[in-house]
Amino acid sequence: MACSAVTRCFFDYFTPKILVIQSKKVGAINRLGQALVIAYIVGYVCVLKKGYQDTDSVISSVTIKVKGIALTNTSDLGLRVWDEADYIVPPQEENSFFVLTNLNITPNQTQSRCAENPGNETSCSSDQDCRRGFRDSRRNGVQTGRCVDFSRTEKTCEVFAWCPLEKDNSPPKPAMLAEAENFTVLIKNNIRFPKFNFNKRNILPHVNSSYLSHCVFNRTADPDCPIFRLKDIVSEANEDFQTMAVQGGVMGVQIHWHCNLDLSEKSCVPQYAFRRLDNKDPDNVAPGYNFRFAKYYTNADGQETRTLIKGYGIRFDVMVFGNAGKFNIIPTLLNIGAGLALLGLVNVVCDWISLTCMQKRHFYREQKFTYVNDYETLSNDVP
Ligand SMILES: *[C@@H]1O[C@H](CO)[C@@H](O)[C@H](O)[C@H]1NC(C)=O
């Protein structure tokens, strides 16, 4: 008995029955669904997302050269000219450069003894108030245990330190190197899309050396020039260079490479964008960007001497983003397959609507499913 049922099942042939529902509502929903899916495939997947392309992201290297001269005339330094070896600290950095715009300078420091700057714990009236060997990370040196004159009216503990101590450490206003706004920077950027073996650099092939020797980047007039005036970089980010120069800050230079390698190589050009990266609110605590560095030399007496500089300035971080696309058959087939599957989904939705939401749903359901009563046929076979 079981054997014959299996045999019958084995020899059954299944074929889907096509039910044509001549209803304007379901028909319209079906066509609308198909139109949406086709619009999605053509408009979004193909045109916007370029689903027929294989993509790769960028590998890049950046080198930088700043040029410009600034002249200062102050009481400590006299007339002084500053060139790039003076104001670029350190001389080389990775994807970044720092331009000194403002400074407090303390010349002729030697390892010796002097009165600590006045403060809560450093003021004293006699040697008893000072502790020999005491040091504090917020102070300048190690106390010697003596109480000495800081000024005519004030006494402070003596320290062993780099003397004379740094005194005024608020930034001069206006910034000392205000002329830094006219410095220019040449940013050389080589990129590579390894999957497509494609190399390019931001000095485009049509740029010759005479153009490069005098051009300055300008978004409308000279968009291909890789030489930027520092003031333009800052003002493109809606900031004022002279304000930023006083306390220092951090700027981002973004280079975007979005290349469609199905088009000619000429259309693959960099786009520049500039942003301020630090918090610009001048009233916030600890604004700007500064650090100390020193230049060491030996004075006429053979004593080690240094010039301490508390430098304020703008660090420019160069960030390179990029991706490239090129036609490839594999992603094309994958996207076509996904599109066809979505078209199939429209049928499922229409079936569901016609069988559950329409007025004639019971009628459609009768037509859609044909129930064969096996028990009846069985009872006819076996009396
Ligand atoms: C920068 O250059 C411009 C034009 O050459 C000049 O007018 C301006 O005074 C310069 N800026 C500074 C701070 O010297």
Image: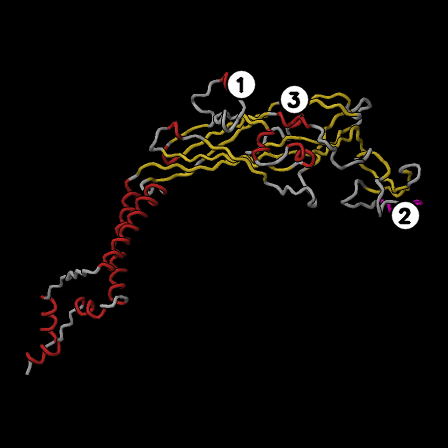
Q: Looking at the rendered structure, which numbered label has been put on residue 213?
A: 1
Residue stretch in magenta? 124-132
Kindly state the secondary structure of the residue where label 3 is placed. loop
Give the number of the disc on residue 125.
none
Q: In which quadrant will I find the C terminus?
A: bottom left
Query: Splitting the image into 4 quarters, where does residue 67 fall?
Result: top right
Q: Residue at horizontal 27%, vertical 46%?
A: 336
Q: Return the residue at label 3.
A: 69
Kind of residue indicated by mark 1: Ser
Q: Residue at x 70, y 31 (%)?
A: 102
Place of residue 66 in the rendered image (x, y in percent of width and height, measured from the top left): 59, 25
* Lateral position of residue 116 relative to residue 32, left or right: right
171 sits to left or right of 356: right
Marked residue nearer the N-terminal end (3 or 1): 3
Q: Amino acid at mark 2?
A: Asp
Looking at the rendering, the quadrant in which ligand 1 lies is top right
Instruction: Give above or below for 323 relative to 222.
Output: below
- Closest to the camera, between mark 2 and mark 3, is 3
Q: Position of residue 279 (x, y in %)?
A: 63, 43
